[in-house]
DNA sequence: CAGTCCCGCCAATTT
DNA sequence: AAATTGGCGGGACTG
């Protein structure tokens, strides 16, 4: 490329300007507008003046949140911020379903091990071909992104440190190297999430160490208007009421189906049945019952997953959820008082 | 020094 | 074989 130099670390080098977060902001700003539908990676890299590699980072993370969806080689479809709530619902749904699964295992006194753990020294030669692609998916930034979000969805701790997240997402691997790598990735994700205003860096009251908190962007009372730089761009519709969730299936989240989802860790354990469900954005959204547009904003083309059993199961959990919520609320208030 | 996290090598996948 | 994707982690940058 005869483009600008890139490694001449002149005196005018500013690391901040090269951050993934800023890149993400620019990326979003570039596409969050009327008429945008398709996104070409080449064009993006060119527009933003960055290496293609970086675009992959952005794109993979955003896809995990539903903002984008891969259409074909080199091409993504812009779904917008509005798709986030839908994606989160899906994630939440899976979380619920898998919690149950784990409950069974736990009840039946099963050792059961972590979620999405990697476990490299596993099956020496037992890895079937089909598991190969799955294995890769396991390490993907996209999946990590979703699991990271899940941590916020299910953990009682509203404050999560990357170390804690890495620990939780890593199973019991005490592998320093793996840990470091995982944390590097989490930083990437945290940066784009921060730039989108989804999370916010805070100080852990106790340890004083840095951590992140899922912001109550959107509804939820007085939203901390951290949102996007250009605030009232598009109106994000967080505040999906669980009662509205319809169990649907989407390829994007298929991988989750294959994994044991359980959020266990030393720091923020959350028993499958413990009332630790924090409700960041889910709550009686009756305030402005505009919430959902009749149908799913996500995977509209996907076939319905009409499984009665799942439906019932889900209904059951929906109630349990709201029940827990009450308790969780109390807890929160107590904590709130100490601020 | 402890957090951060940019950068790009190069392996895995797709075309 | 060529082009895409995208793990991964060395080590530079911050505060």
Image: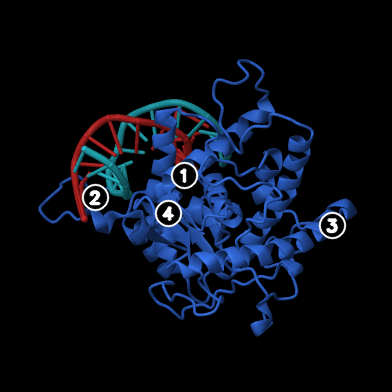
Chain colours: A blue, B cyan, C red
User: Compared with residue B9, is residue A276 higher up or lower down, i.e. above or below?
Assistant: below
Q: Residue furthest left?
A: A11
Circles 2 and 1 in contact, beta carbons < 8 Å: no
* Side of A164 where A114 appears, left or right: right
Circle 2: is it few (<14), some (14-19), or many (20+) Cα within 10 Å? few
Q: Are marks 2 and 3 in contact (CB under 8 Å)?
A: no
Q: Earlier in the sequence, mark 1 or mark 4?
A: 1
Eye-nearest disc, 1 or 3 = 1
Q: Distance from label 1 to label 4 (Cα)?
A: 13 Å
Quadrant of the image occupied by residue A109: top right
Check disc 4 and report the residue beneath it.
Answer: A190
Residue at the (38%, 59%) spot, across then down: A201
Callouts 1 and 4 in the same chain: yes
On residue A311, the disc is 3
**Residue A69 picture location, percent across and down:** 58, 57
Number of residues whose C-alpha sits closer than 10 Å to that of mark 3, classed few (under 14), some (14–19) or many (20 or more): some
Q: Nearer the viewer, residue A261 or A203?
A: A203
What's the mark number on residue A164? 1
Q: Secondary structure at mark 1?
A: helix
Circle 2 sits on which residue? A2
Which of the 4 quarters of the picture holds residue A312? bottom right
The lab-note entry on whether marks 1 and 3 share a chain reads yes
CA separation in Å, label 1 and label 3: 33 Å
Local packing at callout 4 (Cα closer than 10 Å; few below 14, some 14-19, many 20+) is: many
Chain ID for label 2? A
Residue placed at 45% from the left, 49% from the top? A56
The secondary structure type at the circle numbered 3 is helix
Q: Is residue A279 visible?
A: no
Answer with mark 2 or mark 4, whichever residue precedes in sequence: 2
Q: Are marks 4 and 3 in contact (CB under 8 Å)?
A: no
Which of discs 2 and 3 lies nearer the camera? The answer is 3
In this view, the residue in front, A308 or A69, is A308
């Amino acid at each position: 490329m005869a483009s600008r130099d890139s490694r001449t670390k002149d005196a005018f080098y500013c690391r901040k300007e090269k951050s993934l977060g800023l890149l993400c902001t620019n990326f979003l700003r570039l596409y969050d507008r009327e008429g945008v539908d398709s996104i070409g990676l080449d064009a993006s890299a060119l527009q933003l003046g960055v290496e293609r590699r970086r675009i992959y980072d952005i794109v993979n993370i955003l896809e995990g949140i539903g903002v984008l969806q891969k259409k074909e080689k080199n091409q993504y479809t812009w779904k917008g911020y509005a798709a986030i709530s839908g994606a989160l619902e899906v994630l939440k749904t899976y979380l619920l379903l898998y919690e149950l699964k784990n409950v069974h295992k736990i009840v039946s006194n099963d050792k059961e091990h972590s979620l999405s753990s990697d476990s490299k020294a596993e099956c020496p030669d037992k890895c079937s071909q089909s598991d190969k692609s799955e294995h890769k998916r396991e390490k993907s930034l996209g999946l990590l992104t979703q699991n990271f979000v899940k941590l916020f969805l299910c953990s009682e701790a509203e404050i999560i440190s990357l170390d804690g997240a890495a620990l939780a997402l890593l199973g019991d691997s005490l592998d320093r190297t793996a840990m470091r790598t995982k944390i590097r990735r989490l930083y990437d994700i945290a940066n784009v999430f921060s730039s989108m205003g989804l999370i916010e860096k805070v100080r852990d009251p106790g340890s004083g160490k840095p951590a992140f908190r899922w912001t109550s962007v959107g509804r939820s009372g007085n939203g901390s208007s951290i949102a996007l730089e250009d605030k009232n761009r598009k109106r994000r519709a967080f505040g999906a009421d669980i009662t509205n969730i319809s169990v649907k299936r989407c390829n994007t989240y298929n991988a989750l189906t294959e994994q044991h989802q359980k959020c266990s860790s030393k720091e923020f354990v959350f028993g499958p049945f413990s009332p630790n469900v924090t409700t960041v954005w889910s709550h009686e959204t009756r305030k402005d019952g505009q919430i959902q547009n009749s149908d799913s904003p996500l995977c509209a083309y996907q076939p319905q997953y009409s499984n009665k059993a799942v439906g019932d199961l889900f209904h059951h959990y929906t109630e349990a959820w709201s029940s827990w919520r009450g308790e969780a609320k109390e807890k929160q208030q107590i904590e709130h008082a100490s601020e």
